[in-house]
Amino acid sequence: MLSREYNQLIAIRTKSKIQLNHLIERIFPGIEKILTDYYTELLLDFLLKYPHVSCVVKQSEKVFTKQFVKMAEKKEHTKGPQLAKKVYDLALECVPAISSSRSLEIAVESCIHVLRSTQTSTDAIITQMRLLAKELPEYDMVRSMPGIGDTLAPRLIAEIGDIRRFKNAKSLIAYAGIDAPPYQSGQFEGTRRHISKRGSASLRKCGFEIMFILMRREPSEDKDIYEYIQKKRAEGKAFKVALFAGFNKMLRIYYARTMEIYSKLT
């Protein structure tokens, strides 16, 4: 239940990010490139105080710099003066697509409120999921697998559920919807088959995130899955196809290791 709630909140958060991005392009184009980490608290605080280019340029550079540095220091940013200079220069040069208004301020405030509230809620959900997952015997094993951190471990366990309900690894892979269904008609048998996508979309999404992180951060040990994905890419497989092939292999390992843990407990 918590996993489903988490996924719904992430979907809402993503839509709000897109909406805020569209607003930024019209009210202060280029600001996200200066405040490099796009949705940091500093950027959100900045947009609440300066929801339009005109809010910056109506002040002198000295006054703006003082206010910006104070804002940056609250978020423990040490490069406040340098950033303030870049932001002020951008404000003098850029041309907004829409003029400042109270309606615009409400739209910006609404997006930021949704982003912050959903972040608070997802943090609380993941914390509770982690507490529940740590009670399970497989948690430490899952957490140690490459590409799986404190957030993805409880999500993966939640989406798979009790491993003992699957009779074998193939059943788990079919549940994830990444098995290749038979494609046969008469004497014809297809060889180029796509994954079935008949199983849990949430589990597939979680698995894709794990594989994506795994490929971005090459593990120092337990490289079987990483090397398997690299092998598939070397064979000419598309990146997404190779990632799902890696997830297929990971689920087989997950099943074998978890079943071994439970077998020792009985």
Image (cartoon, rainbow, N blue to C red):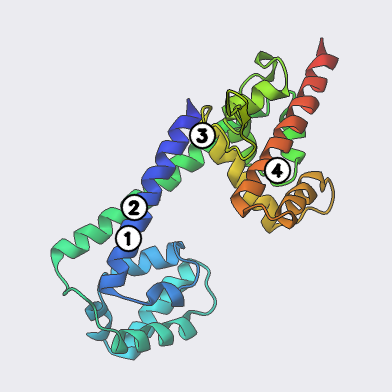
- Tell me the residue at 62%/53% (across/down): 238
Using the numbered discs, state the Cα–Cα distance from disc 3 to disc 4 in whole angstroms: 17 Å
Q: Say which label, 3 or 4, has the lower sequence index.
A: 3
- For label 1, the crowd category at 10 Å Cα-Cα, with few meaning under 14, some 14 to 19 and many 20 or more, is many
- The residue pinned by badge 4 equals 246
Could you tell me if the residues under marks 2 and 1 are in contact, i.e. CB atoms within 8 Å?
yes
Disc 2 is placed on an element classified as helix
Question: Looking at the picture, which amino acid does disc 1 mark?
Answer: Leu
Please name which of the two marks, 3 or 4, marks the residue nearer to the observer: 4
Q: Label 3 belongs to which residue?
A: 202
The amino acid type of the residue labelled 4 equals: Gly
Which residue: 70% across, 55% down? 233
As drawn, 222 above or below 182: below
CA distance for labels 4 and 1: 35 Å
Examine the rendered structure and indicate whether residue 76 appears above or below residue 130.
Answer: below
Q: Nearer the viewer, residue 177 or 94?
A: 177
Residue beneath disc 1 = 20
Residue 43 position, x and y percent, is: 41, 67
Q: Looking at the picture, how far across and down is residue 2, in whole percent?
A: 49, 29
Q: Residue 16: which numbered mark, if any?
A: 2
Quadrant for residue 140, please give it.
Answer: top right
Count up the numbered dots. Answer: 4
